[in-house]
Image: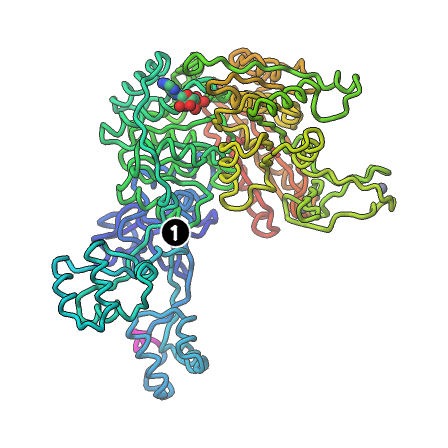
Amino acid sequence: MYAKVIVDVPARPTNRAFDYIVPETMRDYIAVGSRVGVPFGPRTVQGFVVELHDGTDLDPEKLKPIRQTMDVTPPLTPELVKLGRWISRTYLCHEIIALQAMIPGALKAKYERHVKVADDLETEEKQPELLPLLLPEQEEILAHVRKHESVELESLLQTFSEKGALIKQLLEDGRLTEIQMVKDRMSTKKALYVFPPNDPDQLEAWQAELPARAAKQKQVLAFLQEHPEPIKLTELLTKLQITAAAVKGLVERGWLRLEETEVQRDPYASRTFKPTSPLPLTPEQQSVFERIREAAQGRTRRVFLLHGVTGSGKTEVYLQSIQSCLDQGREAIVLVPEISLTPQMVERFKGRFGNRVAVLHSRLSNGERYDEWRKIVRREVSVVIGARSAIFAPFTNIGLIIIDEEHESTYKQEESPKYHARDVAIARAGEHGASVVLGSATPSLESMYRTSVEAAASATPDRPAFELLSMPSRVEGRPLPRVNIIDMREELKNGNRSMFSRALYKAIEDRLHKKEQVVLLLNRRGYATFVMCRTCGYVADCPHCDISLTYHQSSKAIRCHYCGYAERELAVCPDCGSEHIRHFGTGTQRVEEELGKLFPGIRVIRMDVDTTTEKGSHEKWLTMFRNRQADVLLGTQMVAKGLDFPYVTLVGALAADSVLNLPDFRAAERSFQLLTQVAGRAGRHELPGEVFVQTYTPEHYSIMSASKHDYMGFMRKEMLMRKLHNYPPFHRLVLITLSHEQVQLLLRAGEMLASRLKELAQTMQVDGTELEVLGPVASPISRIKDRYRFQCMIKYRGETDISALVQKAAAVLDDIVKQQKLTVSIDVDPQVLM
Ligand code: ADP
Ligand code: ZN
Ligand code: ZN
């Protein structure tokens, strides 16, 4: 039997499968998707089996056998292996990178140096009789290694701590050989468990049998009689306030068994979830649900775009759709943005489906993530809820994939593989004959476009047409909140220099009085957090990056967000010596200060990067706010998403234009989405809500439409703008970013790439396709970590094999990449253009 293996050597020449022999002993448990350790040159590297064959076209004599298998059950399914190839082709990354992205971090390879006793000494040039005689201590070392088959070098050196030189000699003589072993970065967590006898009745008899002085042992037996499940040793000892000696005595008698067993780290184990039952659906929910259920009964892929206003009850539709999918014995994946994956959200799913749900998000520890993932592999769960990478859940019978807040840019991974979870979901659904539901109050223009007649006409298997579903009203006829636009220029004219308009000030005062709650949004990027000299205008920049340094009040330091460079806050201006240095704290810090001045005694919870770095802090703040331990929740985007608090009746967006001014063609869309989302936090329950949007550009269509809850109006205008400028969804983009320390070299490489792209575009142009190459130009952030950055952009429409074109073009840079360490990064359908 022969295997084709993708090896963990991410480079262009190794981006293909290599052939290995499957040794007799491994045949029964090796499969497509298995993780293996294989010899690769002088090393052992991790790889994934992507094909198995009975024969081979190659000379079997030249092939090497697989050295290790890493798991009993393969971590990848054949479908995921196929998906890996699709990702590597679509997003232009090495296949190994795509495959590794699908397994939990705990399974990423760790390489260890092991030694084993050489078994082929005779065939080597070194004849044993010519070797120096073995010392008795060396015999001892060899015996030790032989007993264990192979021993990690580190640990051998520790065991024989004084005899490093002797071990070295054994290696040099070839009596020991060094091999590399692939190990998991994380092992399953194990603990000692006490196992009671299979027949608990015996416990009573044994207690009688024990002498009176063995009181502690009797106590253990009595306890087990009442709790006949295996129990963790440490837990038993603390419960009974005894030492391990008592248990040991019982184990020696052969009555109890002590065994090391796996512990599952379930982060939600200590919480209880109130079971919920399905709500009677509103007519709007019902008709949407019917469509999804009917689709899920078929076995062909259908993709739905569910446009439902905030508070229209999308989650209940998701829950009931999942139920009907489970009723058919199929599995479901739910993706939500990391930031919305709050305990509240998890509770809604655990409440309905109990422990059939696994939760995957990045705030879990590596071990916790691994354990949740293994529940999927072992078929202990049939629903997964998680952030982006949960799309790779190794299910084998998926019926439904839900992506909530589908417009969120975080569904695109910014590092390689630069995949978009939405497109991966569609690809997987194709393999499983599953349905996809993309939900949002503000669907992305890309998704909206795919519901059009034009898109349906040019649909392909990779880019199928979407069916539009909509829920235009809130549950129980609750009104959408009234949105007031406030022109901050007028405020300034009237002498109000505060960051609160008079109207918003009054509204906050009113809510404090009524004991209702307020959410305030301040976009982080809006209020730059820079350090400026008020005398000469000097701004502190990072010496290594093209970006200003950020002031961190808590540590009194100024820091670069890209490379981590930090220095103490400035006392005097390095340029003019003035002492008038202004440290602009994070915008939210300033707002918090001002709130305290304007409303003495006000209780504010501030949520931003500074206050939410600690594990669990995010959840802590939200729980406090939910329990009404604060009047105001103030924060960046993270307060805008998915939160549902009954007492919030006022929402203020303090600087609505901050997103509008970003240098990105999606700025208007992002701004509309953010305002709609944050406005949606108000008045979701019995109490009606009100929203204030403070802006310097009240006439902008993005702000006007958001204030009128007019998604369709906004979408039509924005579609026109995109069409006019050949932007997505009409054209697609590929961004190629080059970086290097020398501008000269970069420029030359950029020119080479651009002209090669243009040349190839000419030859590959097919009827009906348009293709345009822009650049090279300096990237918006032109330097990071002392490396300059240039970019080329391809805009195209129609069916072109863009991957082939880019790959071919990038080959002109191969020599510079290799010899001068030029970095080339390719982003297909980029979400961020910086
Ligand atoms: P969305 O995700 O669309 O913004 P949610 O799913 O959070 O909306 O629903 C808003 C509120 O309406 C929630 O408190 C939810 O429990 C409630 N809700 C949803 N569906 C129903 C229903 N059919 N009957 C009564 N309440 C409902
Ligand atoms: Zn100065
Ligand atoms: Zn920097």
Asked if the magenta segment contains residue 120, the reply would be yes
Foreground residue, 156 or 819?
Answer: 156
Q: Is residue 148 found left or right of 694 in the rendered image?
A: left
Residue beneath the point at 27% across and 42% down: 380
Is any atom of residue 67 visible in this view? no
- Counting from the top left corner in percent of width and height, residue 726 is at 57, 20
Q: Quadrant of the C terminus?
A: top right
Circle 1 packing at 10 Å, graded few (<14), some (14-19), many (20+), is some
Q: Residue furthest front?
A: 212
Render colour scheme: rainbow
User: Could you tell me which residue is drawn at 41 percent across and 36 percent down?
Assistant: 386
**What residue is at 14 percent from the left and 57 percent from the top?**
200
- Place of residue 367 in the rendered image (x, y in percent of width and height, measured from the top left): 40, 51
Q: Work out whether 250 lies above or below 323.
A: below
Look at the image and tell me whether residue 32 can be seen.
yes
Q: Is residue 286 above or below residue 202?
A: above
Q: How many marks?
A: 1
**Vertical order, 162 against 518 (above or below):** below
According to the picture, the residue beneath numbered tag 1 turns out to be: 107
Which residue corresponds to the image point at 26% horizontal and 34% vertical from the top-left? 397
Q: Is residue 225 left or right of 419 when viewed as pictured? A: left
- Label 1 sits on what residue type? Leu
**Foreground pick, 223 / 84:** 223
State which region is magenta.
Answer: 118-125
- Classified by dominant secondary structure, the portion drawn in magenta counts as loop
In the shown orientation, is residue 582 left or right of residue 426?
right
Closer-to-camera residue (394/113): 394
Is residue 778 found inside the magenta-colored segment of the image?
no
Q: Position of residue 15 (x, y in %)?
A: 43, 46
Residue 668's x, y, as percent? 60, 21
Determine the secondary structure under disc 1. helix
Left/right of residue 270 with respect to residue 658 in the rendered view: left
